[in-house]
Image (spheres, rainbow, N blue to C red):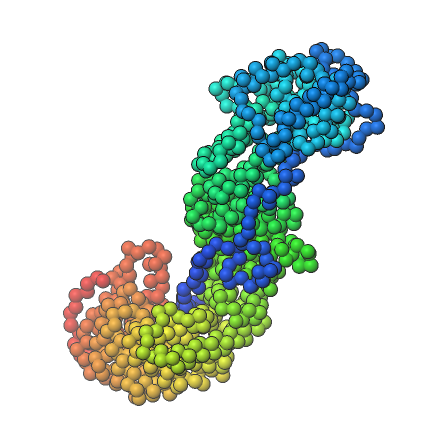
C-alpha cells in the first residue's frame, strides 16, 4: 500500500494492494487482509424442548402404526411366570435303569442300596396330602400364605413332627416319584420349602455338620438322574462350615462357593451351597416376602420392604439367574406391579432387572422403567435410587437382535433420564458415552437387508437423542472424541439417510459439538462428512430443521479450517447445492414477506428473531462468506455470477431495520468477494449497482451495517467508477466524519476509502475538507501504538495526499508540527514498542512495526521535514 518512493518514479497505490513487495503465503494474505476478509459468526439453531416425554418426538416422521407406542398399559399379567424359573444345569438324557436315591444312612460311608418298595402306601399319601394342603392357597394366587414364624418357633414345630415322616420320604425312589407327580401343580421351590420345614432340629444340626447332607434333594418335575444317583440338574451348594448360625451380629457372609469347581468336592459343595441358601431364604428373604404380602395400602411401607429385599438379596448373593427360588420371588414382585405407584414400581423394576430376567419379562420390566422415567416428576426419586445402573447393565449385556424391543424401551428410559442435569452427569461418570457408542457400533454392523434393520432404527432414535443431551457436557465431549464418535455417527448417517429423525438427531449432535475447536477439527478430518452433508441437503432440501443445522455445521467447519474450505468446495456439486438452497429459501422468504405485507403488517412491530427461512439464508450466506476466505475458492466464487446475484437480491428486498443479521451477513459476503480482482468477476460487473444499494445501508442508523458498507466501499473504491460515485454522492464526507468514531475498525475502513481516493490526483484536495487531515493525525495519535496496520494506512494516505508537496504548511496546515512530533516518537523503537507485553504479542507488534509502519513513516517524515521551513524543538514523551 506504499504510495511512492519519490516524486518522479513512484506511483500511488490503492487500498487493496498488499504492502510488502515479496510474494506472501495464503496465511499471510488472510492475516494482513484484516477486516477485508472476515469470517461470520451466528447463533446455533434453537431446539425447543418437547412439552412431553415421548418415545418418538412430535416431529417424528415415523408412522404411528410402524413404531412402538409411547403409552401402554402394564399389569402383572404382562409378565410370564414360565420365564422366571432359575437356570438349571445341563439336562442329561434319562437313563434306561431306574434312578437310585441315596438312603438315609447314619454312616456317611455306608454304601448305596437299591430302592425298596414303600412300606406303607398310605404314609406316602398322607405326606402328599399334607403338602398339598399347605400349598393349596399358593396355587390359588397367594404365593406366600403360610404363617410366618420365628426361627425358634419354626424349630419347635420341626421337633414336633414324627420322625417317621422323614424316614418315609427316604424309603424309595418310587415314593419320591409318586410325590413328585402329586405335586405337579405346584412349583419346585415350594416343595423344597416344605421338605426342609419338616426336618427335625437334630437333623438340621446334622446338616450343619455335613453328616446328613444326603437328605437334601430337590423335586424338579421329570428330572433325569445320573448313574451315581444324583439328579442331573442339582446345583452346587455352599460348604457347611461357611454358614453362620442365625442370631449372630455379623452380616450374612457373601457366598463364594458358587464358583467352586474342585475335583472330588463337587458333591459336597452342591449340598452345602443349597443348605446355606435354604437357611438364608428362611431367615432373611421369606420374612420380607411375607411382609410384602401383608401390606396392602401403605405404599411407603411397601417401598421400604422392597428396599430391604434388594439389600438382603444382594447380601445373600441371590441376585441374578442362579437363585433357585427365583420364581417364587418374581411372582410376588409381579403381583405388586398392579399397585398404581411410581415409587413402588421403581423399587420393583430395580429388583426385577437385578434378577436378570429375559424374554417377555425383560420387555415388561423395561416398559415399567420407561413408564416411570416418562414422568418428569419422578426424576427426584430416580436420582436417589440405582435404576440407571440396572438399565446400563441391560444395554451392556443383552443381545441386540434377540432383545431389540426391550432395549428400545430401556434406551427410551435412559433418554428421559438424560433430560435431567443430575442424572446426565451421573451417566457420564458411569461410562455411558462409551457404552452407547459400542451399542451404536453394533447397530451399524447390521446391514439394510437384515430383518432387524428397521426395528433397530427405532432404537437408534433413542440412542442418538441421548447422545445429543450428553454432548452438552465437556467430559462427554472429550469421551466422544476419544472413542471415535465422529466415524460411527457418520456411518449411521450414511446407513439411515432415509430416516429423517435419526439424521436430525445426529446432525443436532454435530451442530452442538462443531462449535468447539477440538471436535470441529476431528469432524473436518473425516473426509466422508462433506459428501454426507451434501447428500442430506439434496435429499431433505425443504426440511428446515435439518437443513439449517447442516448449514450451521458447514459454517463452523469453514470458519476455522482452511483445508475444510477447500475440501468442501471441491466436492462435486457443492456450490450448486448451496445455490439451489439459496433460491428455495429466498422464495420462501419472499412469499412470507408478501403475505406479511398483504395483511397490513407494515404498522406492526417486526418479530425479534429471524423467520425460519431467514435463518437458513443467514447461515447459508455465512458458509459462502467463510469459503471465500480461501484464496482460490474466493476467486472462484467471485466469478460465480449466480452467487453474487443472490447476495445482491438480499440487499435489494431486505432492510437492515427489519432483518439486521441477514443484511449484514450479505454485505460481509459481498465484501469478501469484492476483495478478489479476477477475470470475469461478477462483483466487478455489478459494482455500480452494489454501490447504489449499499448507500441505503451506509445511511442507516445501524452502526454495524454502516461499518460493513464502508468495508465494501473500501474494496470497490479501487475502481474509478466507484470513486466518481463516492464524490458524486458526497460519500467521502461521510468517510471523513467516521474518523471521529473512536473505533479502530471503523477508522481502518474509512481510511481505506480515503486512501483509494488519494490515488487520483484530482481528488486529493477533498481530504482537506471537513478537517480530514486533522482527523487522520488524531487517529494516528490515538490508535498508532496499539495498531500498526492502521498507523501504516494513515501514513500511506498522507503520503499519497502530499505527493506534489511544495510547502508542508500548505498541505498540513496547523497539524504539521504535531505530525512531525508524532512520527518522530512512533519511529523510536524504545518508545513505540511496549516491551512489558508477553513475548508473542511483542514479536507480533514488532513485525508489523518494522515491515509495515516504519518504511512508510520514515519516508513521510523525511518529506515533511524537507518541505518545512522551521522545525521546532520537541520533547518526546513515551506512549
- Residue at the location (51% across, 74% down)? 581
**Above-or-below relation of 668 to 441:** below
Taking depth in this image into account, of 534 and 98 the one nearest to the observer is: 98
Taking depth in this image into account, of 63 and 764 the one nearest to the observer is: 63
Q: Quadrant of residue 121?
A: top right
- Residue at the location (79% across, 32% down)? 93
**Above-or-below relation of 669 to 207:** below
Q: Where's the N terminus, which quadrant?
A: bottom left
Q: Is residue 236 visible?
A: no
- Residue at the location (59% across, 32% down)? 143
How far across and how far down the image is residue 487, in percent?
57, 56
Q: How many marks?
A: 0
How far across and how far down the image is residue 698, in percent?
32, 79
**Above-or-below relation of 428 to 515:** above
How far across and how far down the image is residue 785, in percent?
27, 65
Q: Is residue 746 visible?
A: yes
How far across and how far down the image is residue 609, in percent?
37, 68
- Residue at the location (58% across, 17% down)? 157
**Farthest-out residue, right:** 96
Q: Where's the C terminus, which quadrant?
A: bottom left
Left or right of 144? Residue 115 is right
**Above-or-below relation of 539 to 343:** below
Amino acid at each position: 500500500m506504499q504510495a511512492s518512493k519519490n516524486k518522479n518514479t513512484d506511483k500511488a497505490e490503492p487500498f487493496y494492494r498488499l504492502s510488502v513487495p515479496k510474494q506472501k503465503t495464503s496465511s499471510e494474505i488472510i492475516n494482513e487482509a484484516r477486516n477485508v476478509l472476515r469470517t461470520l459468526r451466528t447463533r446455533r439453531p434453537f431446539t425447543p424442548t418437547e412439552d412431553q416425554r415421548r418415545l418418538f418426538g412430535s416431529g417424528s416422521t415415523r408412522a404411528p402404526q410402524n413404531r412402538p407406542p409411547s403409552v401402554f398399559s402394564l399389569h402383572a399379567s404382562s409378565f410370564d411366570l414360565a420365564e422366571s424359573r432359575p437356570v438349571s444345569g445341563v439336562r442329561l438324557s434319562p437313563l434306561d435303569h431306574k434312578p437310585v436315591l441315596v438312603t438315609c444312612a447314619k454312616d456317611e460311608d455306608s454304601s448305596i442300596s437299591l430302592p425298596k418298595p414303600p412300606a406303607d402306601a398310605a404314609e406316602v399319601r398322607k405326606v402328599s396330602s399334607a403338602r398339598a394342603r399347605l400349598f393349596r392357597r399358593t396355587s390359588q394366587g397367594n404365593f406366600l400364605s403360610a404363617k410366618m414364624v420365628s426361627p425358634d418357633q419354626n424349630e419347635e414345630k420341626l421337633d414336633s413332627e414324627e420322625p417317621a415322616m422323614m424316614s418315609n420320604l427316604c424309603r424309595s425312589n418310587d415314593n419320591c416319584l409318586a410325590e413328585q407327580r402329586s405335586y405337579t401343580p405346584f412349583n419346585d421351590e415350594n416343595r423344597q420349602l416344605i421338605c426342609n420345614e419338616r426336618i427335625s432340629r437334630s437333623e438340621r444340626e446334622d446338616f450343619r455338620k455335613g453328616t446328613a447332607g444326603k437328605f437334601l434333594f430337590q423335586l424338579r418335575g421329570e428330572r433325569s438322574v445320573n448313574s451315581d444317583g444324583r439328579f442331573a440338574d442339582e446345583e452346587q451348594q455352599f460348604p457347611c462350615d461357611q454358614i453362620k448360625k442365625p442370631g449372630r451380629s455379623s452380616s450374612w457372609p457373601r457366598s463364594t462357593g458358587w464358583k467352586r469347581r474342585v475335583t472330588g468336592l463337587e458333591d459336597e459343595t452342591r449340598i452345602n451351597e443349597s443348605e446355606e441358601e435354604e437357611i438364608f431364604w428362611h431367615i432373611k428373604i421369606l420374612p420380607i416376602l411375607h411382609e410384602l404380602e401383608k401390606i396392602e395400602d401403605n405404599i411407603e411401607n411397601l417401598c421400604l420392604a422392597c428396599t430391604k429385599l434388594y439389600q438382603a438379596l444382594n447380601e445373600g448373593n441371590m441376585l441374578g439367574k442362579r437363585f433357585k427360588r427365583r420364581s417364587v420371588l418374581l411372582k410376588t414382585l409381579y403381583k405388586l406391579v398392579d399397585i398404581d405407584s411410581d415409587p413402588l414400581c421403581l423399587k420393583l423394576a430395580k429388583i426385577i432387572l437385578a434378577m436378570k430376567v429375559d424374554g417377555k419379562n425383560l420387555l415388561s420390566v423395561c416398559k415399567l422403567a420407561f413408564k416411570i422415567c416418562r414422568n418428569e416428576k419422578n426424576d427426584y426419586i430416580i436420582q436417589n435410587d440405582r435404576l440407571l445402573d440396572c438399565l446400563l447393565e441391560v444395554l451392556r449385556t443383552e443381545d441386540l437382535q434377540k432383545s431389540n424391543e426391550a432395549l428400545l424401551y430401556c434406551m427410551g428410559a435412559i433418554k428421559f433420564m438424560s433430560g435431567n442435569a443430575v442424572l446426565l452427569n451421573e451417566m457420564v461418570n458411569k461410562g455411558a458415552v462409551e457404552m452407547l457408542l459400542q451399542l451404536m457400533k453394533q447397530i451399524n454392523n447390521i446391514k439394510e437387508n437384515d430383518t432387524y434393520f428397521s426395528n433397530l432404527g427405532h432404537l437408534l432414535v433413542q440412542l442418538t437423542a441421548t447422545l445429543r443431551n450428553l454432548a452438552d457436557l465437556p467430559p462427554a465431549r472429550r469421551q466422544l472424541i476419544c472413542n471415535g464418535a465422529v466415524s460411527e455417527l457418520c456411518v449411521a448417517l450414511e446407513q439411515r439417510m432415509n430416516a429423517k429423525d435419526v439424521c436430525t438427531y445426529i446432525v443436532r449432535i454435530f451442530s452442538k459439538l462443531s462449535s468447539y475447536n477440538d471436535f470441529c477439527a476431528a469432524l473436518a478430518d473425516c473426509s466422508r462428512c462433506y459428501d454426507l452433508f451434501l447428500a442430506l441437503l439434496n435429499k431433505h432440501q425443504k426440511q428446515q430443521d435439518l437443513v439449517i443445522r447442516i448449514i450451521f455445521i458447514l459454517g463452523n467447519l469453514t470458519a476455522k479450517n482452511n483445508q475444510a474450505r477447500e475440501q468442501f468446495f471441491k466436492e462435486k456439486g457443492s456450490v450448486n447445492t448451496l445455490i439451489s438452497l439459496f433460491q428455495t429459501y429466498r422464495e420462501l422468504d419472499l412469499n412470507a414477506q408478501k403475505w406479511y405485507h398483504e395483511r397490513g403488517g407494515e404498522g406492526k412491530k417486526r418479530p425479534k428473531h429471524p423467520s425460519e427461512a431467514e435463518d437458513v439464508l443467514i447461515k447459508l450466506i455465512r458458509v459462502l462468506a467463510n469459503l471465500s476466505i480461501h484464496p482460490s475458492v474466493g476467486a472462484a466464487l467471485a466469478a460465480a455470477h449466480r452467487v453474487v446475484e443472490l447476495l445482491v437480491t438480499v440487499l435489494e428486498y431486505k432492510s437492515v431495520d427489519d432483518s439486521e443479521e441477514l443484511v449484514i451477513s450479505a454485505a460481509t459476503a459481498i465484501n469478501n468477494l469484492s476483495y478478489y480482482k479476477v477475470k470475469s468477476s461478477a462483483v466487478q460487473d455489478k459494482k455500480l449497482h452494489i454501490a447504489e444499494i449499499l448507500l441505503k445501508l451506509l445511511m442507516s442508523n445501524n452502526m454495524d451495517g454502516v461499518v460493513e458498507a464502508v468495508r465494501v466501499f473500501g474494496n470497490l473504491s479501487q475502481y474509478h467508477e466507484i470513486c466518481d460515485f463516492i464524490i458524486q454522492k458526497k460519500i467521502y464526507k461521510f468517510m471523513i466524519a467516521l474518523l471521529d468514531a473512536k473505533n479502530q475498525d471503523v477508522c481502518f475502513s474509512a481510511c481505506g476509502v480515503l486512501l483509494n481516493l488519494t490515488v487520483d490526483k484530482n481528488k486529493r484536495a477533498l481530504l482537506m475538507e471537513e478537517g480530514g487531515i486533522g482527523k487522520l493525525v488524531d487517529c494516528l495519535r490515538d490508535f498508532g501504538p496499539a495498531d500498526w496496520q492502521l498507523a501504516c494506512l494513515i501514513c500511506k494516505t498522507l503520503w499519497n495526499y502530499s505527493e506534489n508537496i511544495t510547502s508542508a504548511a500548505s498541505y498540513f496546515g496547523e497539524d504539521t508540527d504535531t505530525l512531525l512530533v508524532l512520527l518522530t516518537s512512533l519511529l523510536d523503537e524504545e518508545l513505540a514498542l511496549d516491551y512489558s507485553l508477553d513475548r508473542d504479542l511483542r514479536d507480533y507488534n514488532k513485525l508489523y512495526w518494522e515491515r509495515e509502519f516504519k518504511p512508510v513513516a520514515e519516508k513521510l517524515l523525511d518529506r515533511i521535514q524537507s518541505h518545512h521551513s522551521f522545525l521546532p524543538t520537541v520533547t518526546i514523551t513515551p506512549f
